[in-house]
Amino acid sequence: MLDLRFVRTNMDLITQMCKDRGYELDLSRFRFLDEKRRAVLADLEELRHERNTATDRIAVMKKHSEDASLLISHMKTVSARIKELEAELPEVVDELNSLMLLIPNIPHESVAVGLDSEDNPVIKDWGDIRDFEFTPLPHWDLGERLNILDFSRAAKIAGSRFSLQIGAGAALERALINFMLDVHTTVHGYRETLPPFLVNSESMTGTGQLPKFREDLFKVEGWDLFLIPTAEVPVTNIHRDETLSFDELPLKYVSYTPCF
């Protein structure tokens, strides 16, 4: 989530950034809630100061046998108003935070702006594209011919767009997973992790899936648990709410998980 003060002072930048991403973001409600939050905080600070000062004044008046009934009556009104504002503030803050969670991060200035993938510039090429003397088959056709992929039975088991790896197909996927993990851990210095495949709403919020993408997530009914969309979610949350020392950094983790 972006810093509140950054959003407050860069609303034009954020509005334009959202337009570049292809959608309109109305920050008028944010502006209203931000101003209301600051106004409530200012009123609370002033009223609490008044109450503290009056409490001391009432003690002095009673000590000197002076009539403090009017001041006590006024303080009852002040205390009631403080109670109202203290109840109102969390509601304002909660709605403000909910809006803040809908604001995406600012892309790096080098990121191209375009309507679709056709507007993406090619940054780097490696290798040569092979020129086949025959028409190569897509992997889904080749896999079924080799009897290492079965889409019809996968659809029977789960539904469309699922695949069932068989024999060498399953072995190939397992080998690729091991190869990826081995390279990262033995060559690049990453630490392997095997995180939970279910995470709570705090974890989903920490990586930005909630509240924006709630409708795209798979939730366990009756539990505060979601199936992870990528390994990024549980791995990023490993050190959530922790303070890391500079000497501990960088921390490099690698993980393989299903992605729901």
Image (cartoon, rainbow, N blue to C red):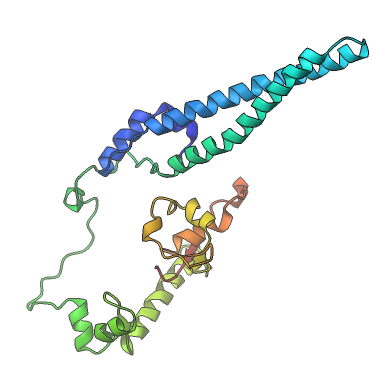
Q: Is residue 101 above or below residue 12?
A: below
Q: Which one is nearer the viewer's eye here, 223 or 201?
A: 223
Question: Can the viewer see residue 252?
Answer: no
Is residue 24 visible in the rendered image? The answer is: yes
Residue at the spot 39% in from the left edge and 41% down from the top edge: 103
Q: Quadrant of the rendered structure where residue 80 is?
A: top right
Q: Quadrant of residue 71 in the image?
A: top right
User: Taking 207 as reference, is 107 above or below it?
Assistant: above
Residue 43 is drawn in which quadrant?
top right
How far across and how far down the image is residue 24, in percent?
28, 39
Compare residues 236 and 253 and report the one nearer the observer.
236
Vertical placement of residue 164 versus 17, above or below: below
Q: Residue furthest left?
A: 133
Q: Percent position (x, y) of residue 139?
A: 21, 77
From the viewer's perspective, is 86 left or right of 225? right
Q: Left or right: where does residue 55 sit relative to residue 187?
A: right
Tell whether 124 sits left or right of 214: left
x then y, percent, for residue 168: 32, 88
Q: Residue at x 65, y 19 (%)?
A: 46
Residue at the location (40% across, 44% down)? Answer: 102
Quarter of the image where the C terminus is located: bottom left
Q: Nearer the viewer, residue 50 or 258?
A: 50
* In the depicted structure, whether residue 144 falls above or below residue 4: below
- x, y (%) of residue 87? 61, 35
Q: Is residue 243 left or right of residue 79?
A: left
Q: How many marks?
A: 0
